[in-house]
Image (tube, rainbow, N blue to C red):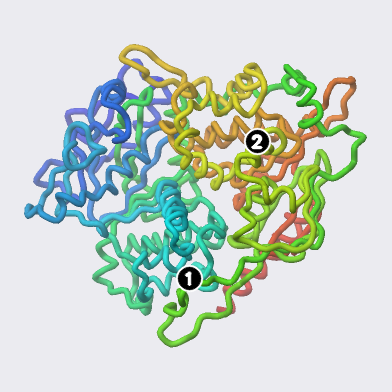
């Protein structure tokens, strides 16, 4: 049941309709003191305001817009800096990113000519607004709004790729921050580069950076331009623990205003007092105290989103997320019973072909390793751009570039083993993920040593074209990563096919694909295909799904392929609590079954798992007890290989003590 609210005559209180459930009523407690209910003469000035707005993506047809219009328009006010930051919550597919895209839109044609202090954007000036209005307190320009999101990450990679295709030099992190015109880093940018540890990476091409490193580049670029509005849409995704803590501190300081002793990097107090923050996340531990205005985005059957807003009233991030989940989870797949081990066994053997028997099953008596790296190193060639990093500092020459992505790695993965790959940003995890998926371009790197993935040798794998790599991956390696997600979105042909066909192409059976989709809850969600008719979500084009919904489709496709090697590189990025919980439960159940000694002669799923994450405390420790081995990377080297218990009991504890000692020393 959808959430239905009605504002009472007294203002500020929200009353549920009689047909709403007890869980819906719990959400109404979140909005007991909505500041937007004040009378017009008492209301504070606004930075931006939606009034009875209907939102849509411009790329969709007019018929789709009409089919997906909500019964009531969206009303949402963003207050200026200095009044507390804005927290925007909502489940996958609710419309948060659409709302952010409408906010971040910059109208080049009208913004430079308007003379009014209050500009009204309707469907003629803001393509994301089909009805109603979007008002701003003054004209917005290209640097008024900055955003860090999945979309901005994707746009940067696309821009870097196009630059090479047009015959230009590869884009470096330095050029990504300063822009195509180059020039000096501002004092603010230099401060942020050092704070996020990017100085040694400025010479590196964007294509060789990890997901977390690219997020840092985007954050530096956004923060350095000192926008009036900063949109952070799952901006902490891909960051290691230390980087998340640094960014959270910066967000708190940005909302409060920096103290005088924090302004040594050349940022004036006047400038910092004029940036408002809209923060979107699915993780309660990321919510800082300074986010005082809470809004929940709701969308019924894929219609235009609406927003319910109110004051935070001192609630913790965990309390806010629990209220959201308890009130809005009408089709929460995490509440479904998990399949039994017998059901997993039947599914694994369902509609098996002789090809699958030889390519997706590793027999118990075959002890040859799935993955073997022997003294393996991978290096980035020296950059040949004309002095990109010479402008980093006015007084110092840049340090020699760091060449090694991986260095002298010895690592073996046996059939049926379940590994955690840990380490900070830039440690080499993304590079290792690409190697396992055979997804590295040999022209960008040089290697030495030996690597074998399944039965394929390194030299053979990396010199085949992308189509052959994809076909091989389809049958042997189940790989999901942010990089693969973005590559799929960037492919016009693949993004146009339906989500169901994307799942179906990875396995040879409708029944196998449909069963996994049901277990992951993808058959539960529906959208309006036309007035009065609903359509299962996965029957829509992949490009029309939200980031989180797309991620679940890619994960379903990887699991449905029943691979002998499953490589999940930060699989929970962009997933809400319900989808994240269900995914982890499903992966653990598959791992449990692959560890059971078969009692029959039927095929036994001895699936090996490589799980890469910065969130082992939130994901691995509570949800994935079957992971029994850990490799920890630092600066491209394996500094720990051993059991799960030894890692969490000794290594992690020792690292924390060393970090605490370093903090005290500083």
Please tell me which residue lies in front, 133 or 357.
357
Q: Say few, some or many: other residues with alpha carbon within 10 Å of mark 1 (under 14 / 14 to 19 / 20 or more).
A: some
Numbered badge on residue 642: none
Q: Residue at x 49, y 70 (%)?
A: 202
Numbered disc in front, either 2 or 1: 2
State whether residue 301 is above or below residue 257: above
Determine which residue is flagged by label 2: 471
Q: Residue 68: x percent and y percent?
A: 31, 24
The mark that comes first in sequence, 2 or 1, is 1
The local secondary structure at tag 1 comes to: helix
Residue hosting label 1: 195
Residue at the extreme top of the image, as rendered:
532
| Quarter occupied by the N terminus | top left
In the depicted view, which residue is nearer to us: 492 or 432?
A: 492
- Whether residue 83 is visible to the viewer of this picture, yes or no, is yes
Residue 644 visible to the viewer: no
Q: Residues within 10 Å of mark 2 (few under 14, many from 20)?
A: few
Question: Which residue shows up at 36% across the image and 43% down it?
Answer: 88
The residue that appears at 80% across and 63% down in the rendered structure is: 375
Q: Give the residue displayed 43% in from the left and 32% down from the top.
A: 545
For label 2, the SS is helix
* Residue 81: image location, x then y, percent: 26, 58
Q: Is residue 439 left or right of residue 69?
A: right
Front residue (pair 145, 162): 162
Q: Marks 2 and 1, Cα distance to the nearest angstrom?
A: 42 Å
Rendered location of residue 326, percent (x, y): 47, 30
Whole-percent x, y for residue 111 in the image:
16, 53
Q: Using the rendered view, name the quadrant where residue 401 is placed.
A: bottom right
């Amino acid at each position: 049941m959808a959430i239905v609210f009605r504002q009472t005559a007294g203002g500020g209180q929200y009353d549920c309709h009689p047909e709403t459930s007890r869980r819906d009523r719990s959400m109404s407690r979140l909005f007991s003191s909505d500041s937007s209910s004040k009378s017009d003469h008492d209301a504070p000035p606004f930075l931006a305001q939606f009034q009875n707005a209907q939102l849509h993506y411009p790329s969709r047809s007019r018929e789709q817009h009409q089919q997906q219009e909500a019964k009531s328009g969206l009303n949402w006010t963003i207050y200026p800096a200095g009044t507390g930051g804005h927290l925007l919550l909502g489940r996958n597919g609710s419309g948060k990113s659409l709302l952010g895209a409408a906010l971040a839109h910059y109208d080049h044609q009208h913004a430079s000519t308007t003379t009014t202090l209050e500009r009204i954007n309707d469907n003629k000036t803001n393509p994301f607004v089909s009805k109603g209005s979007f008002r701003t307190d003054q004209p917005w320009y290209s640097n008024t709004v900055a955003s860090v999101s999945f979309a901005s990450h994707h746009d940067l990679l696309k821009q870097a790729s196009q630059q090479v295709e047009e015959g230009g030099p590869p884009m470096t992190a330095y050029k990504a921050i300063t822009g195509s015109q180059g020039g000096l880093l501002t004092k603010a940018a230099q401060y942020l580069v050092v704070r996020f540890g990017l100085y040694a990476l400025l010479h590196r091409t964007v294509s060789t950076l990890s997901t977390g490193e690219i997020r840092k580049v985007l954050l530096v670029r956004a923060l350095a331009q000192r926008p009036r509005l900063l949109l952070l849409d799952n901006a902490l995704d891909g960051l290691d623990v230390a980087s998340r803590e640094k960014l959270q501190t910066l967000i708190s300081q940005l909302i409060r205003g920096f103290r005088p002793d924090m302004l040594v990097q050349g940022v004036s107090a006047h400038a910092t007092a004029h940036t408002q923050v809209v923060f979107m996340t699915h993780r309660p531990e990321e919510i800082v105290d300074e986010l005082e205005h809470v809004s929940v985005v709701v969308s019924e059957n894929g219609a235009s989103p609406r927003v319910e807003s109110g004051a935070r009233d001192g609630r913790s991030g965990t309390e806010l997320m629990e209220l959201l989940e308890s009130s809005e989870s009408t089709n929460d797949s995490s509440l479904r019973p998990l399949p039994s081990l017998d059901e997993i066994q039947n599914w694994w053997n369902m509609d098996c072909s002789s090809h699958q028997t030889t390519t997706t099953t590793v027999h118990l008596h075959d002890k040859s390793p799935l993955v073997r790296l022997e003294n393996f190193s991978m290096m980035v060639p020296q950059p040949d751009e004309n002095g990109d990093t010479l402008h980093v500092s006015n007084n110092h020459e840049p340090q020699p570039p760091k060449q090694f992505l991986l260095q002298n790695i010895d690592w073996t993965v046996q059939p049926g083993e379940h590994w955690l790959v840990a380490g900070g940003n830039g440690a080499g995890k993304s590079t290792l993920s690409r190697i396992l998926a055979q997804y590295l371009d040999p022209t960008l790197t040089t290697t030495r040593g030996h690597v074998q993935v399944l039965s394929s040798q390194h030299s053979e794998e990396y010199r085949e074209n992308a189509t052959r790599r994809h076909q091989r991956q389809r049958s042997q390696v189940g790989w999901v990563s942010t990089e693969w997600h973005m590559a799929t979105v960037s492919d016009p042909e693949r993004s146009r096919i339906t989500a169901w066909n994307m799942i179906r192409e990875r396995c040879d059976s409708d029944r196998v694909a449909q069963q996994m989709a049901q277990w992951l809850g993808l058959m539960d969600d529906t959208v309006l295909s036309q007035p009065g008719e609903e359509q299962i979500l996965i029957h829509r084009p992949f490009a029309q799904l939200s980031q989180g919904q797309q991620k679940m489709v890619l994960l379903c496709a990887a699991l449905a392929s029943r691979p002998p090697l499953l490589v999940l590189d930060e699989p929970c990025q962009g997933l809400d609590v319900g989808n994240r919980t269900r995914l982890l439960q499903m992966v653990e159940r598959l791992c449990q079954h692959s560890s059971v000694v078969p009692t029959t002669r039927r095929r036994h799923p001895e699936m090996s798992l490589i799980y890469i994450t910065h969130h082992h405390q939130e994901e691995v420790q509570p949800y994935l007890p079957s992971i029994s081995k850990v490799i920890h990377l630092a600066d491209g080297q394996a500094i720990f290989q051993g059991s799960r218990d030894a890692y969490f009991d000794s290594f992690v504890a020792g690292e924390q003590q060393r970090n605490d000692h370093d903090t005290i020393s500083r």
